[in-house]
Image: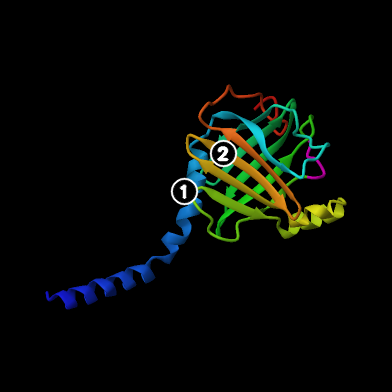
Amino acid sequence: MRPRTALAFAFACCLTACGSTPDSTDAAPQDAFFQQVASLCGQAFAGRIAEDRPPTPDNPLAGKALVMHVRECSRDTIRIPFFVGGDRSRTWVLTRTTSGLRLKHDHRHEDGTEATLSQYGGDTIDLGTAERQEFPADAASKALFAREDRGVSVSNVWAMEIEPHERFVYELTRPGREVRIEFDLEHPIPAPPPPWSISPKR
């Protein structure tokens, strides 16, 4: 094949390939992210506040031991209890959807009953990357925040990041506010007790 003909053929093949596989390409970053988080299943890690801007004197996380436990993993759902000192009320729930990923916050009282401010979060609105996914507050969460006099939270965007074998990040941002918690993936710690969302019999 002559050089110019070969070049044109290769270019045509490239165009054909680029146009024929959008679905698999689109799904890859979110699948990769989900799989990387799932690979931590069963492990627990200590965290620290990396950003708290502007600093808030009433931050409930300040001065407390912070622990995440990748406790339950299935094909489409990962449950990650997040402990703040002795408070075991919080669980992050990461779920696959037909269009991407969803993050919800499951909050419980010590007796296992659900808190009023619970099941808030959002869905991804773009592909993100294998290392970072963002979750803007969804309509149901905005309605909940408005109903519970938490109007400042309607513009919340949560994010999760993972650097395998190095760190996992949970982040909350909104205009004028940023909280970022980093967990050390290099040094797993013993698993904590079950979260309050788990019955003692389970």
Disc 1 secondary structure class = helix
Q: Position of residue 5 (x, y in %)?
A: 17, 78
Q: Position of residue 61 (x, y in %)?
A: 75, 34
**Residue 147 in the figure: left or right of residue 178:** right
Q: Nearer the viewer, mark 1 or mark 2?
A: 2
**Mark 1 closeness class: few <14, some 14–19, many ≥20 residues within 10 Å:** some
In the picture, the disc for residue 168 is 2
Q: How many marks?
A: 2
Which of the 4 quarters of the picture holds residue 22? Answer: bottom left
Please tell me which residue is depicted at 53% across the width and 58% down the height of the picture. Answer: 127
Q: From the image, tell me which residue sits under label 1.
A: 32
Disc 1 versus disc 2: distance between alpha carbons?
A: 15 Å
Which of the 4 quarters of the picture holds residue 72? Answer: top right
* Location of the C terminus (image quadrant): top right
Between 55 and 202, the one nearer to me in the picture:
55
Please tell me which residue is depicted at 23% across the width and 77% down the height of the picture. Answer: 8
Between 202 and 23, the one nearer to me in the picture:
23
Label 2 is placed on what type of residue?
Answer: Phe
Between 147 and 61, the one nearer to me in the picture:
61
Label 1 is placed on what type of residue?
Answer: Ala
List the single residue furthest toward the left: 1
* Location of the N terminus (image quadrant): bottom left
**Residue 30 in the figure: left or right of residue 191:** left
The answer, for residue 61, to whether it is visible in the render is yes
Which of the 4 quarters of the picture holds residue 21? Answer: bottom left
**Mark 2 closeness class: few <14, some 14–19, many ≥20 residues within 10 Å:** many
Q: Position of residue 131 (x, y in %)?
A: 51, 47
List the single residue furthest toward the top: 190
Residue interval drawn in magenta? 113-117
Disc 2 secondary structure class = strand
Q: Position of residue 121 (x, y in %)?
A: 69, 51
Q: Identify the main secondary structure in magenta.
A: loop
